[in-house]
Amino acid sequence: MGRLDGMIALVTGGNSGIGLATAKHFVDEGAYVFITGRRDAELTAAVKEIGKNVTAVRGDVSNLGDLDRLFAQIKTEKGRLDIVFANAGVARYGRLGEISEELYDTTFDINVKGMVFTVQKALPLMPDGAAIILNSSIVGSKGFSANSIYSATKAAVRSFARTWTTDLKDRRIRVNAISPGSIDTPGLSDLLASSEVGEQRKKMISASVPLGRFGTAEEIAKAVVFLASDDSSYVTGIELFVDGGIAQV
């Protein structure tokens, strides 16, 4: 018996990194999982890696038409949705004074608009007592340089966990945010390698994380499984930091 036996789950951005690791853990715990991503090749590889009880749906969470198509497919194939892990997001550096309109629009469209409408459009499929997990970040609580736009989007995610907990209390739908620290994923590796800021950030992380290392996607996935399962049945509205202590001390 897995902790998620018989449940239907959605993981946006489930084709790599934290999303893929979480989808795999959901399936291992007995769930059937839908994953989304913007690239067919990565989705195909993810489905192969997960191995069973998974359907991939290509789409961009900032495109409302793509979301409508996603939820129509889930409704047709499974009829309900017990767990939503709103994970899809992007991170890009931009120092104040050098922030472009394109960087602002892209980051807010995916990280904020995409999350709002992912959750809102999922609600008609979600039974009372379902679980929603939002992927935030420690940057919503920290003042790292060149991170103001990305950090603002993640602070919004933390706020959503509070307000949506109140909005959904009559349905007993639990809404929680998970805030990873620096996690060893392809996305972070690409970001850190993309600029001098990234290289400086990499050195800072290795020197300042109390546990002395980057986290792994699997460590985040285990925490998401906790928030999705009945193990956290009396937990809602929280921000769960999984960060090696960097935002805590």
Image: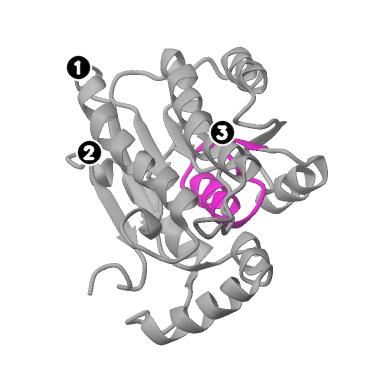
Of labels 2 and 3, earlier in sequence is 3
Establish if 141 lies above or below 203: above
According to the picture, the residue beneath numbered tag 2 turns out to be 236
Q: Estimate the x, y position of residue 9 in percent, counting from the top left.
A: 50, 33
Viewer-side label of 2, 3: 3
According to the picture, the residue beneath numbered tag 3 turns out to be 109
Instruction: Place residue 177 in its image quadrant.
Output: top left
Q: Marks 3 and 2: in contact by CB < 8 Å? A: no
Q: Amino acid at mark 1?
A: Asp
Q: Residue at x 37, y 79 (%)?
A: 209
Examine the structure image and report whether residue 110 is included in the region drawn in magenta.
Answer: no
- How far apart in space, not on screen, are marks 1 and 3 (Cα)? 29 Å
According to the picture, the residue beneath numbered tag 1 turns out to be 170
78 and 101: which is toward the camera: 101
Q: Secondary structure at mark 2?
A: loop
Q: Which residues are magenta?
A: 11-36
Q: Estimate the x, y position of residue 124 in percent, counting from the top left.
A: 43, 12
Establish if 211 lies above or below 183: below
Q: Quadrant of the N terminus?
A: top left
Q: Is residue 164 left or right of residue 1?
A: left
Q: Is residue 137 visible?
A: yes
